[in-house]
Image (cartoon, rainbow, N blue to C red):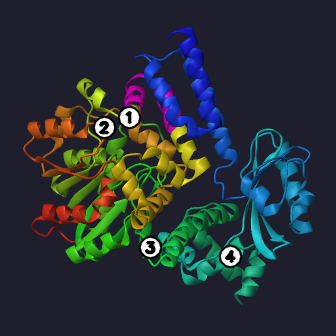
Amino acid sequence: MRTHDNADLIESVYATTLDPAEFDRTIERWVQQIGNRGDRAFDRHLRIAFDLLERTARNDTDPTVPQLELGPDLRILHANSAMRTLYDVSVGDTLDDLPLDASARAEIARTAKRLARAEVPGQPVVVPAWRTDAENSLVVILTPSGTGGCRLQTSELVWTPNLSSLLAESFSLTKAERSVVRLLAEGCSVEQAAAARNASIATVRTQLQSIYQKTRVSGLTELVRLVIGLAAFSPSDARIEEESLSAGRPAPYPRAEHRHLLTLPDGRTLDYAVFGAKGGRPLLLLHDGICGNGWPASAIDEARRLGLQIISPLRPGYGRSEPLRTRRRDTLNTIVKDILYLLDYLGIDSVVIVAKVLGSASGTRLMAIAPERVSGMLAVVPALPIEKQDYAGLSTQHRMLVHAVHANPTLLRYFVRARYALYERYGIHAFLAKVYKSTADREVLADPDCLSAIVHGARACGTRSFRAYYGDVREPFDDMHTVAAAITRPVHILLGAEDANGRLARAQRLAALNPHVTVTVLPKGAELLFYRECHRVLQLAANLHGQPASLPRTAG
């Protein structure tokens, strides 16, 4: 790599780190200048830039959650936009400037000093507080910052019916246990919770031990953090629902009551949803990366009409599905094991797969490992093997991604992180507008029902799922002949004519290698074809079922 080119590339890395909106322009420059091998100096700057993106994300992980960083003297070193706006504080202010009750501020000060003195970073600490200007209760979470101070995050816990349903359905908490959780999360002591419930302290302690066991937490701090996490997850459903209903539209699916958690044999948690026709023919949705598993409400009406029940697991690291605990090179095999365990748990013998983009890789692997469990697969704009003759037909970003997967893992990690930084800093709507630029995709984004479903699915997957997406793309896809050999059931590939990544040529090569594969190209459609054609997707999936498959014995 030439010296002046190298300097130009390094400059572009930091420009994107400062402002992820520069991502497109940076990719254009990289594609023009990067050769087939990495450059050590360039890679070193990529690692530094990656760490900067991570640090920024930690300081402002969710722009809607008020967060700040306290120095050793308990003055504010950094405050995100939500903290500055909602609490009217600035850099240089002290704890006394926060509108919290005096006893809470004193406890925060003591805890912050203790965390700063600790030689070994401790666990997060939860401090109940009362907001004096708004007169409502909240919790403050303190975590060591590693720089002699600590980070402070507030959560004004709003208890919604959705949150209560999530606790009941995800952890099988009884009504009494949910009441105890609510009181403790809102700042009550065990004694105060007992008094509020007109119960003995011993009874509440027994209920609390049952709650710890069911939720798999080790103490009150972890329990409160779990509730805050679920509360942050639940209002997104409520917000989407409110937006939809205020515009006279039904909310997208899956909704909060359709989501469940399942403990896998290795102890990880699997986030999945079941919705559509209760007891209907099972359709397994394997989601894309960022856009997730959202469906417009009208599509689920069609699913019910067709007698289809949709089972939608989220891959490791997405949503509430726990990431893999070790770095593995057999990620797809693990995903398939998770899916098979879920199907066994639900009592489902055979499914039709609907796979969106990256979901097609795990769909094909499922067919290879357990062909008896698959009746067929509808692959919508699938991720297909890429060979040298395909490079010219790829979009700029896709070409860069393929290069990084095969030649430069450091670049791949930064590429994925910078893409997610755009999402984190500017929000999902701006992200979608930046990424999906074809006429067909812009028409999808202009449709309120489609856009609502996309945003809904993206929020369910989570803005911090970049490590899961990195896990999806870091393993090179199987070659075309390996994929063809794995297909032993009917596979229907659905593409749009405006696809910018040359998928048609690859799909046709796959069909030439395996008579089970058929390809349909629709005149309008690109990356977001699934949302434009979700009714057609369901009809094609119903056709793949043919004879009714084994029905679920339980909805989970």
Q: Quadrant of residue 84?
A: bottom right
Which residue is depicted at the point 47% across and 52% down?
A: 318
Q: Position of residue 195 (x, y in %)?
A: 76, 86
Disc 4 residue type (three-letter) = Arg
Q: Is residue 407 visible?
A: yes
Whole-angstrom CA distance, mark 2 to mark 1, is 7 Å
Q: Which residue is mark 1?
A: 398
Q: Which residue is mark 4?
A: 205
In the image, residue 401 lies in the stretch drawn in magenta: yes
Q: CA distance from mark 4 to mark 3?
A: 39 Å
Local crowd size for mark 1, using a 10 Å CA cut-off: few (<14), some (14–19), many (≥20): some
464 shown above or below 457: above
Label pair 3/2, CB-CB below 8 angstroms:
no
Q: CA distance from mark 3 to mark 1?
A: 33 Å
Task: Give yes or no for residue 552 being in the magenta stretch.
Answer: no
Quadrant of the rendering where the C terminus is positioned: bottom left
Residues in magenta?
397-417
What kind of element bears circle 2?
loop
**Which amino acid does the dot numbered 1 rest on?**
His
The main secondary structure of the magenta stretch is helix
Q: Quick check: 553 left or right of 170? A: left
Residue 60's spot in the image, x, y percent? 68, 49
Label whose residue precedes the other's in the sequence (1 or 4): 4
The residue that disc 3 covers is 251
* Residue 354 tag number: none
Residue at mark 1 to residue at mark 4: CA–CA distance: 55 Å
Q: Label for residue 501? A: 2
Q: Are marks 2 and 1 in contact (CB under 8 Å)?
A: yes
Q: Residue at x 7, y 44 (%)?
A: 515
Q: Residues within 10 Å of mark 2 (few under 14, many from 20)?
A: many
Q: Nearest the camera: 92 or 502?
A: 502
Give whichever of discs 3 and 1 has the lower sequence position: 3
